[in-house]
Image: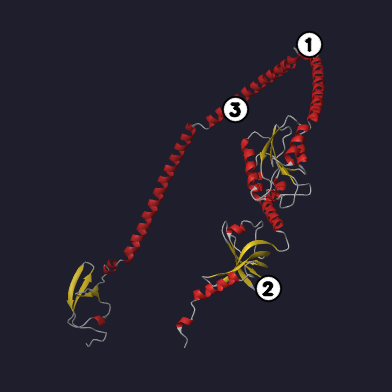
Amino acid sequence: MSDSQDYLTVSALTQYIKRKFEVDPYLGKVYLTGEISNFRPRANAHQYFSLKDDHAKISAIMFRSAFAKVKFQPEEGMKVLVVGRIGLYEPSGSYQIYVERMEPDGVGALYQAYEQLKKKLATEGLFSAPKKALPRFPKRIAVVTSPSGAVIRDIITTTRRRFPIAQIVLYPAQVQGDAAAANIAQQISRANQAGNFDTLIIGRGGGSIEDLWPFNEEIVARAIADSALPVISSVGHETDTTIADLVADVRAATPTAAAELAVPVYNEVLLQLNQNRTRVFNAFQNIVQHDRQQLTKLMASYVFTQPNRLYEGYLQKLDFLMERLKQAGSQNVQQATQQSQRLTQRLAQQTPIHRVRQAETQVTNLQQRLQRGAQQVLTAKQQQFARAAQSLDLLSPLKIMGRGYAFVTTPPDDKIVRSAQQLAPDATVQIHLADGQATAKITKVDGGNQDG
């Protein structure tokens, strides 16, 4: 059996394998292509995901500093090209790739980032938001661009030639490099905070997509969208279209075109003013002449020559209305008198004394009827009672007993003897007669079941 010292610990084996990964020259810098999987974006943090193809998968990590340099937004299922190193994560014993650079496979990273940001801002409505109108005669124009480029010189030259009374104020900004976007956004904000500008121009000369990239950054797009000043964007050449161009209120193909859009031609303005002044003067003369004609016409009217004609018609109408008023008053009085007479007649017919007398007569009649009815009912009841008493007298046992009949009872319960079978010799009985009673003793019973 082998000695225990021949066995390695898991940590020792993992450290050994990790060392192999670190010293292998082929694993120190690996160029890898694959499809992103298990990607869950984490804001301002390290990113963990996987790269896979049809037959294998490898874990990947991209530290925050490296991920901040990625110009596009990685998405689940996106095929990418990455550069990194292969290492071993000791706690789990799994190998992974530490990604240092990443770009889309088949599409440039900057173009991918441009399309993603364009889609995002379009969904939010930044491109379709109402555009602010440029002022016709601006007094102060803010320009955000490089102080050493040809852009500011072209804008100043064009503005002085066309509209020299406008003041140009430069807000110097970096227009290229990693820090340019934040600097441009800061200068746009400063120009808005000043509060004394009419128009804002941002721009730079032409170049590659990398050179123009600061104007494709989200921070610049949102600064333009938040600007209270109308913004003219002049970035690159006529064929270049940046995110800033899409968000701005007006897009100019060149800095010269931006200045031409921002200011009018002074001489043309003066010419237009002179023409307008002439038109106003002529229009005013026409109005005065027309008003004079109207005044002459009105002064010749009967209103001023015969003012009494104004109220003649009203006097006649007043007489007519007064006559109608009198007639209407007479008719109303007559109708009211007739109505009063009718009501008085109806009241006399409906006076309470007649109703009282009628009620008294009705009460007398009802009392007489009541007396007669009561007498008739009493007589009928007396006759009915007499007949009932006579019938009862005819049916009374006393009446029968008065003719010589009697009935026998047996003491002590006084049961009436109805049959000879109820009697027995030597039995005592009570004989009830019409005028009294007698007690007797039975000596003999004939009939029934008794023996003689």
Foreground of the two, 423 or 302: 302
**Residue on which the image places disc 2:** 54
Question: From mark 2 to mark 3, how far is it between C-alphas?
Answer: 113 Å
Q: Crowding at label 3, few (<14), some or many (≥20) Cα neighbours within 10 Å?
A: few
Q: Secondary structure at mark 2?
A: loop
Q: Secondary structure at mark 1?
A: helix
Answer with the quarter of the image where residue 171 lies. Answer: top right
410 displayed left or right of 331: left
Determine whether label 3 and label 1 are within 8 Å by CB.
Answer: no
Task: Say which mark, if any, is on residue 305.
Answer: 1
**Residue on which the image places disc 3:** 339
Q: Secondary structure at mark 3?
A: helix
Answer with the quarter of the image where residue 281 lies. Answer: top right
195 displayed left or right of 392: right
Please name which of the two marks, 1 or 2, marks the residue nearer to the observer: 2
x%, y% of residue 408?
23, 74
Foreground of the two, 190 or 16: 16
Q: Crowding at label 2, few (<14), some or many (≥20) Cα neighbours within 10 Å?
A: few
- Name the residue type under label 3: Gln
Image quarter (top left, top right, bottom left or bottom right) of the C terminus? bottom left
Question: From mark 3 to mark 1, how far is it between C-alphas?
Answer: 55 Å
